[in-house]
Image: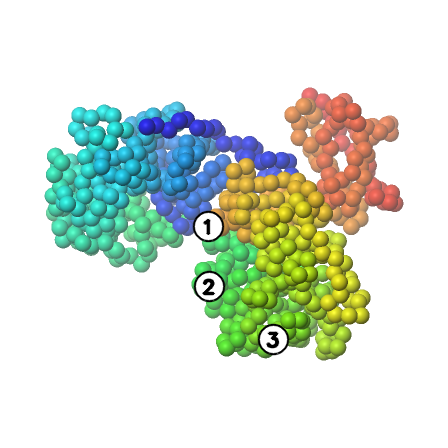
Amino acid sequence: MRFRIALLFTLLLSTLIPAQEAGNWKVYSDMKNTYDAVEGASGIWAASSGGAFFYSPAANNYKTLNKSDGLSGSLLTASVIDKNGNIWFGSQNGMIDVYNPVTNKVNTIFDIFNSDRTQKQINELKVKGDTIIVSTDFGISLIDAHSFLFFDTFFKLGSFQSFSRVKSSVMFNLFYAATDNGLAVQKPGTTNLSAPESWNVFSTADGLPSKNVLKIIEYKNEVIVATDKGFAKFNNSILSPFLPELTGKSISDILPVGDSLFILNGDTIKVFVNNLLSVKTFLNTSVKKLLYGSGGLMGVTSKGILMIETGALLFPNGPAANQFPSIAVDPAGNFWSASGKDGRGVGFYKYDGNKWTTYNSGNSSFTLNDFYKIYAAPDNTVYAGTWGAGFVSIKDDSIKVYNYLNTDMEGLYGSPQFLVITGFGMDSKNNTWILNYASNNHKNLSMITPDSSWYHFVHPTTPAPLVTDQYLNLVLDQYDTKWFNGITTGRTGLYYFNENKTYDNTEDDKYGFINEGSGLLSNSISSVVVDKRGDVWVGSNSGVNIITNTGTILSSSTQNPPIRISSVFSLRQQAITCIAVDPLNRKWIGTNQGLLLVSVDGTQINETYTSSNSPLPADKIVSLAVDETSGKIFVGTDEGLAVFETNAQKPVTAFTELFIFPNPYKLNNNSGELTIDGLVKESDIKVLTINGKLIKEFSSPGGRVAYWDGRDELGKLVSSGIYLIVAFDKEGNNITTSKVAVLRQ
């Protein structure tokens, strides 16, 4: 039985992108968690849970490869270098990427990925001449290293169950396969290995220490079978004990190097040489696999590639983990991310465009690494909330810690010292608001004034708050009303509160509660944001609601006045994970099936991005953030962070100078567009000849940048010459001009 040839092509980044809205993608991921590695002529290639990286010992630097560089797989599980110098990477989902370091191109083999098998992981890749031997979760495949075509696949190995998991396979005159069920060996003289009768199988009854076979190696012209409980020697279909003193011991790997055998046994590496077994080293880091290269013995670990002799760990600079539960961009353009809760957190991290920096309990003044929420305030202060230890503020590299000891904030009922912070916001008076997940004293909202005065608030909503109530997702609208959602069973829904800028007077406070009975699609709320018009967008497991008349909360003489709530038809029944608003007031919608771009009012879905049609590392979108200055969209997934550029850049407040590029504009049928930068909000643009003849008139998308395709009103490319670019605001009161030289080719 053989795979049919499915789909094979050179994966160019441009072919991944479904529309012009997103461009210049870049993926950032944690690559410390390695699964395999192989040494090439000039360095080490490693396969990791975030892509691949190359380390050059001579230059002491790294190169990374991920989906934005052309790889199809994100979680890579196997690697090998063929005799032509191409690096092969297998992945958890069955993708096989072949990287040519000379051309910097990637060929992707989709056959296994496109198969109907449920378990498709590539467990090992080996080279035998011009053949790549692929061990998978369902059998063995053979691929021609030149054509990248499958020429055989073995699903049924002897009497073992069909589609048995093969962890390793090798050819020493005969074909050997390590499976979860035992050892499978090609019968001498057989050639059709697709036939089950061409295989002999061996298990514990035949002399294996365990049926869980890990690997088969050749050592001093003998075949050694490694299991998770010891070793056996295979000779003429007979299994005999090998290193019996290790029988019953925990074995993870075995590696022959010359006359030596290195054995990974628990937290030790043992060496067998000259018929003597001894301990080479004790390990402080858990090692998955051993390899040997010019730098000596190495280990594949979850913390990078471990150099056994020196203890050094090799991994490229990147985020501390592929965990992005909450992300933000500060006014300077720095990216920030929280990392997680319930013991999974590793601190919080910052990316300045060149380098990732991690803040954790090992290098900072706080004691807990479970950072759950991140917020970048307009005044360049960044706030990071923890799951249990309060929050920190960061400004000018100075970190301040706030907890139950120095804030009068109380945490969980019965454990007031366990202070969980799930939201931040800044109001029009530059007061910072903090949302307490669950407060022992009902005061779930706290505020810090610019002069560092503290105020704490109870929101007396109906139903009346309980000390066991739990809250998430704080946002503030243009009226300084605080919006957040409750997640306590029986009390889920959307809450709002406005203290009316009288911090000590509760008589004029405004508050209310909205749920399915009030018009929400669902009480299970995942995201709350305020758009550029002041409308509140509420994402839930059933779609999106929009609240449009938020001003009535303050203007009404009664509490909980009627509020206009509508639903977004285009997003009906979508499980929403997160929402972000760009400078053009469009909405970026995260779901479990990918990323959506919807129109300003939500009536149209303009774009859909998935891991299949874009460099998104995964389809489950965890978090979103927008850099309004650059137009970049940041997309957090559980397999990495994707960043791409859009034309949604914050407009300038007044015209100063237009930046036109490229200039000169070399124009042909394949030319890109001319960029017009420096626009005010909703600019209109005219392209004129030097004599004042109108060539083209159009409007900007609404932000700082617009584009001209070099065509006139009839859609024809213009002639060579000097053209005037005239931009003016929608009232026609402000105007600016620039010139561009067009060169027809």
Q: Position of residue 605 (x, y in %)?
A: 66, 42
Q: Is residue 138 above or below residue 320?
A: above
Who comes first in sequence, dot 3 or dot 2?
A: 2
Q: Give the mark nearer the N terminus: 1 vs 2.
A: 1
* Mark 2 element type: loop
The answer for how far apart the CA atoms under marks 1 and 2 are is 20 Å
Residue 30: assigned label: 1
Determine which residue is flagged by label 2: 342
Around disc 2, counting alpha carbons within 10 Å, would you say few (fewer than 14), some (14 to 19), or many (20 or more)?
A: few
Determine which residue is flagged by label 3: 442
The quarter of the rendered structure image containing the N terminus is top left
Residue 99 vs residue 20, the one in the foreground: 20
Cα separation between marks 1 and 3 = 39 Å
Asked whether disc 3 touches disc 2, contact meaning CB atoms under 8 Å apart, the reply is no
Dot 1, how many residues are within 10 Å of its Cα: few (below 14), some (14-19), or many (20+)? Answer: many
Q: Amino acid at mark 2?
A: Asp
Left or right? Give the position of 557 relative to 482: right
Q: Which mark is in front, 1 or 3?
A: 3
- Residue flagged by tag 3: what amino acid is it? His
